[in-house]
Image (tube, rainbow, N blue to C red):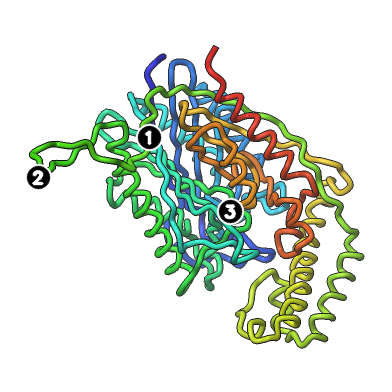
Amino acid sequence: MPPLLAGAAELEITPPLDVPLGSGFNPPKVTAIADRLYTRALVLAQGPDRLALTCSDILAVDPQLARDVRERVEAQTGISGARVMVAATHTHSCGGRLQPSRGNGDPALLEMLGRQIAAAVAAAVRRLAPAGLAVGAVPVHGVSQNRRDPEAPIDPSLRVLRVDGPDGLIAALTTFACHPTLVGHDRPAVLSADFPGVLAHTVRAVFGDAVVILPTNGACGDVNPIATGSGLQAARRIGRILGGAAAATLARLEAAGQTLTADNTRWGLSLPAASDAGVRVTHPRLGAASATVCVPYKHFEPAAAAEQAGAAVARQLADAGVGEATLERWKAGSVVPAGEDASLPPADRDARRRLASDLLRRRSEAWTAGVARRQGIAGTPAREIEIQAFRLGDQAAVLAVPFELFSKIGREIHAASPFPYLFLIGYANDLGGYLMPDEEHGRGGFEAGITFYGLGAADVVRTEALALLRALAAPAV
């Protein structure tokens, strides 16, 4: 087997200040830069096989951006576009105008970003050197919660890939499933990488600025951060917690695969010691596979009917005593303090929450239906979209999906994966949007309205994703 090589690089991609914030139905203008935004690239090579993984501090990957990056990378480095992953951290406080397929695109900014991501890959290729891999995971509790049901399970695992060169650590890839929505709530609006950026800077504070950290996101479609203080303060707190856990895991992984001992002064012996260091990828074998899956769209109500139904729900809430200010915030897709809701009798509270869920669903679905009509997909049965997988060795693989997967879907894929260490990366290669289990559609809420997909969609994606992973896990012929 040819030796493994690796190289990594990062470039700043902070946009000019005359951009809107990256998220929301009516995003405000950005007024300042809280922290710089970056694109980061990791290239792995083994003989003729080469894989390029990129992660950028942006909200999502428009399909036009993915095509542009892949074409540029192939032209500049010879790496096939099918072996290039273009992922976003999903920070909600990046600069907007990067989604022309959703009607919010600036061609000049998008082209510049494509050039920058491809340039980071090309720089990583120039730095290729003999390398080794190690993988580990650690649970991080108290920083995230299911945002549709506080009692519902989530995946608290922070997964870490360590990449060593001849002189030590050169790069790391982390995956943690949680929405980076914190700084996006602050006003006035500022540019920020949110907690994934703080995670990366925290690790570099321990291991040095030459180390490149790719802080990717996982199945976080229904997972939000647990906040305190301003959005920027909360992002720094959570980023430091996650960055500290990542740095500790990387330090433990230095000993992965080694014999550990501890001196015993009673018996005068050096004894073997137990370790939670993780796993050294002793026989790296690169591979790649992708599949085009046909994901069923949902039925979109006509605009007039949706507007009338939403108004009827708002009237019911008003009749139940919900104030106009609260209704306006819900119509805008925002949340309100829980004080009044929590003080209601259980039956009244449950009835109010059901109506609020319906209103939030209808409000977001009006936007989704508008996008569907502009794109000409209203009435179309399904969408073809790419899922991508990279094999790193017998123990580890990367699965890149274009969706905001609900936690349950991600946990099911992890549980059935043939690779003990799976880096499931969302927001990759396309603008897929929310993907939820069938039972969640009837529960209403923002996500049930904003998703483009209907019943059976999660099953299709889960099945195809696991088929890709099993094909990569098959022994080499």
> How much space separates mark 3 and mark 2, taking CA atoms?
50 Å
| Residue at the image position 27 percent from the left and 46 percent from the top | 208
Q: Nearer the viewer, mark 3 or mark 2?
A: 2
Query: Could you tell whether 202 is left or right of 322 in the image?
Result: left
Q: Residue furthest front?
A: 267
Query: Could you tell whether 188 is left or right of 276 in the image?
Result: right
- Amino acid type of disc 1? Val
Q: Earlier in the sequence, mark 3 or mark 1?
A: 3
Q: Quadrant of residue 136?
A: top left
Where 344 falls versus 396 (above or below)? Answer: below
Residue contact between numbered discs 3 and 2, judged by CB atoms under 8 Å? no
Q: Quadrant of residue 303?
A: bottom right
Q: Say few, some or many: other residues with alpha carbon within 10 Å of mark 3 (under 14 / 14 to 19 / 20 or more).
A: many
Q: Say few, some or many: other residues with alpha carbon within 10 Å of mark 2 (under 14 / 14 to 19 / 20 or more).
A: few
Q: Earlier in the sequence, mark 3 or mark 2?
A: 3
- Amino acid type of disc 3? Cys
Q: Residue furthest top?
A: 477
Could you say which is closer to the camera, residue 236 or residue 25? 236
> How much space separates mark 3 and mark 1, taking CA atoms?
25 Å
Res 220 label: 3
**Circle 2 residue:** 266
**Circle 1 residue:** 279
Can residue 65 be seen here? The reply is no
Q: Position of residue 37 (x, y in %)?
A: 46, 52
Can residue 164 be seen here? The reply is yes
| Residue at the image position 79 percent from the left and 69 percent from the top | 358
Quarter in which the C terminus is drawn: top right
> How much space separates mark 1 and mark 2, taking CA atoms?
31 Å
Quarter in which the N terminus is drawn: top left
Query: Could you tell whether 474 is left or right of 331 in the image?
Result: left
